[in-house]
Image: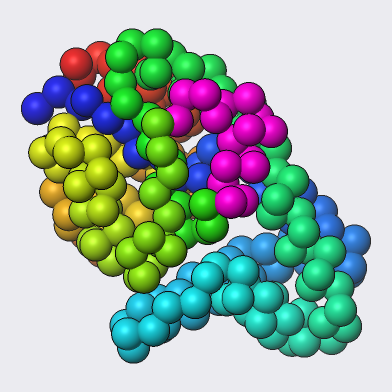
């Protein structure tokens, strides 16, 4: 079915995490410390969800980062500065144009994030994209983290559309898999992971957000 709404993942998809990587490197951490931190934070989020608990993302991100720094023999006090960078991320250069193109074509645009609504709105406003986003659907609305299907179904309910008419755009394969489990269409942006990392069939993919926008509009 034609897409009527597009849900964008936020961190890593719309926004570049290079600022956080630079702050980690300034502390003496190797470049891949950023991936180690985010993987640990996401593992914690999954564990929290599976055990029936919920904590806001900043409450998970801080101890996960402190743990990574401890393994690198870096004082944990440096975590505060790195965490602050998550509120100061730059949009990927292709993000504003892709979002504007989709919005100007009449598609409804939503942010669907594991982060907080407050920080997401701040990032979108700073990048000049806030006007195109109808709403921000955050995991704090649901009490579980992506890729739990309830997060995607919350977006379906708020948009009041069939799931098949909503497309998720995300740079994380696990996010794409979660969306598909809830009946959404999805496009995987391959620039971060490079190769599909999951033992399930690969989703439709695009090299960047501009290509994803073209694909969505072309299918309509």
Vertical arrangement, residue 205 with respect to residue 82, above or below: above
Q: Quadrant of the N terminus?
A: top left
Instruction: Tell me which residue sits at (30%, 21%) in the image.
Output: 107
What's the magenta bit mostly, secondary-structure-wise? helix
The residue lying toward the viewer, choosing from 17 and 114, is: 114
Q: Determine the residue located farthest toward the top in the rendered image.
A: 104
Residue 184 x, y percent position in the rendering: 19, 44
Find the magenta span and give its range: 118-133
Residue 170 x, y percent position in the rendering: 41, 44
Q: How many discs mark residues in the rendered view?
A: 0
Residue 206 x, y percent position in the rendering: 39, 32
Q: Confirm whether residue 183 shows in the render.
A: yes
- Whether the magenta-drawn stretch holds residue 125 is answered as yes
Q: Quadrant of the C terminus?
A: top left
Vertical arrangement, residue 111 with respect to residue 141, above or below: above
Vertical arrangement, residue 211 with respect to residue 114, above or below: above
Q: Is residue 218 left or right of residue 214?
A: left
Q: Is residue 216 left or right of residue 11?
A: left
Q: Confirm whether residue 43 shows in the render.
A: no
**Quarter where residue 76 is shown:** bottom right
**Quarter where residue 212 is shown:** top left
Instruction: Tell me which residue sits at (15%, 42%) in the image.
Output: 163
């Amino acid at each position: 079915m034609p897409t009527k709404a597009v849900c964008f993942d936020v961190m890593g998809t719309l926004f570049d995490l290079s600022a956080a990587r630079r702050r980690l490197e300034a502390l003496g951490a190797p470049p891949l410390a950023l991936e180690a931190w985010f993987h640990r934070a996401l593992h914690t989020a999954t564990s929290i969800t599976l055990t029936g608990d919920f904590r806001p993302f900043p409450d998970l991100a801080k101890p996960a980062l402190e743990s990574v720094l401890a393994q690198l023999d870096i004082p944990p006090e440096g975590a505060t500065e790195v965490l602050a960078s998550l509120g100061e991320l730059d949009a990927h250069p292709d993000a504003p144009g892709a979002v504007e193109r989709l919005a100007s074509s009449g598609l409804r645009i939503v942010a669907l994030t594991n982060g907080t609504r407050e920080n997401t709105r701040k990032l979108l406003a700073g990048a000049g994209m806030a006007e195109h986003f109808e709403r921000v659907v955050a995991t704090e609305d649901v009490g579980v983290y992506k890729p739990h299907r309830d997060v995607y179904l919350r977006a379906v309910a708020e948009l009041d559309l069939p799931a098949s008419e909503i497309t998720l755009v995300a740079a994380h394969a696990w996010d794409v898999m979660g969306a598909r489990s809830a009946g959404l269409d999805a496009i995987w942006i391959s620039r971060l992971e490079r190769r599909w990392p999951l033992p399930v069939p690969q989703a439709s993919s695009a090299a960047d957000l501009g290509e994803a926008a073209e694909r969505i509009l072309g299918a309509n």
